[in-house]
């Protein structure tokens, strides 16, 4: 399979290595200094593009993939407010977009467990729930896209929570903004930015008697990169908007 990479930071380089190890060919690499290559024959020859950049440019990159007729797998979070407009453009151009907040197989297994636990907790209203996430200092959005997906999984399945809200952000210098206070029907999601942490997501149910904790701790970016390549393999040749529920049957 021919793959184009859009964004060539740490994730892009790991994706390149994993894709090649699985027998794929990297036909084009686009970064900030060669945007004109979206119109190149090499880019247009790709069976699928994998986009990992930053929130402010991701929607534009995705639209350029549509214009070139190349299906795109996007792993950039932090632009959910533009998703519906991008979907409309995708449909107008008969394009393909696979989007996920996290491509790690382990995280998606964790999310399935998270939803199941939330359903169980409908029978035990003496437990309250909160969530926190930790990421490296380079991550610009908060909470993380993965944390939002996990929070939505809780809100959709735990009747006593109506929505999630931003909790407290602890910045790399130790300063904070926001608050952990929230209403009884809200789920607080707090964030920490420190070091080079690939990602830790923790969900805590607490009663007066005990504490139940589940968490996912990414050891490296390898799992995210492999999942993105698996998504590219799944996406090639398909049309429309796709996600992890389409790729992983255990989520349905």
Image: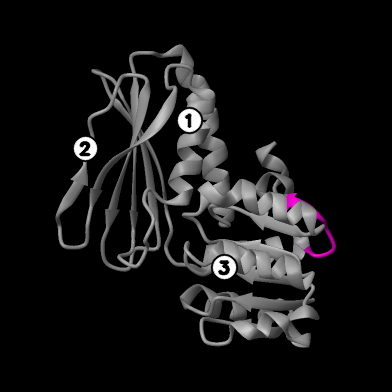
Q: Which residues are magenta?
A: 236-241
Residue 88 shown in magenta: no
Q: Is residue 7 left or right of residue 185?
A: right
Q: Is residue 237 magenta?
A: yes
Sequence-wise, the earlier of marks 1 and 3 is: 1
Residue 32: x %, y % from top left: 51, 81
Q: Main secondary structure of the magenta part?
A: loop
Which image quadrant is residue 38 in? Answer: bottom right
Give the secondary structure at mark 2. loop
**Comes first in the chain, label 2 or label 1:** 1
Along the line of sight, which residue is nearer the eye, 208 or 230?
Answer: 230
Circle nearer the viewer, 2 or 1: 2
Please tell me which of labels 3 and 2 falls first in the chain.
2
Q: Position of residue 144 (x, y in %)?
A: 42, 51
Residue beneath the point at 50% across and 35% down: 152
Q: Judge whether residue 65 can be spotted in this image.
A: yes
Give the secondary structure at mark 3.
helix
Pick the quarter of the image with the N terminus. Answer: bottom right
Task: Find disc 2 in the rendering and name its residue.
Answer: 179
Which residue is label 1 attached to?
A: 154
């Amino acid at each position: 399979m021919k793959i184009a990479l859009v964004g060539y930071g740490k994730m892009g380089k790991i994706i390149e290595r994993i894709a090649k190890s699985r027998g794929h060919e990297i036909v084009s690499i686009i970064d900030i200094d060669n945007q004109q290559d979206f119109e190149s024959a090499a880019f247009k020859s790709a069976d699928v593009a994998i986009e990992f950049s930053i929130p402010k440019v991701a929607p534009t990159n995705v639209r350029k993939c549509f214009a070139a007729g190349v299906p795109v797998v996007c792993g950039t979070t932090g632009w959910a407010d533009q998703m519906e407009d991008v979907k409309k453009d995708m449909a107008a151009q008969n394009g393909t977009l696979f989007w996920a907040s996290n491509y790690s197989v382990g995280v998606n297994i964790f999310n399935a467990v998270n939803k199941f636990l939330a359903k169980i907790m409908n029978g035990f209203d003496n437990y309250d729930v909160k969530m926190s996430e930790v990421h490296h200092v380079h991550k610009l959005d908060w909470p993380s896209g993965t944390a939002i997906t996990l929070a939505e999984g809780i809100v959709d399945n735990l009747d006593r929570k109506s929505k999630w809200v931003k909790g407290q952000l602890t910045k790399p210098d130790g300063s904070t903004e926001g608050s952990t206070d929230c209403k009884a029907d809200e789920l607080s999601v707090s964030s920490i930015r420190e070091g080079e942490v690939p990602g830790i997501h923790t969900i805590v149910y607490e009663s007066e008697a005990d504490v139940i904790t589940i968490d996912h701790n990414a050891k490296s970016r390898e799992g995210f990169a492999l999942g993105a390549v698996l998504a590219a393999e799944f996406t090639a040749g398909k049309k429309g908007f796709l996600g992890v529920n389409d790729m992983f049957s255990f989520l349905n």
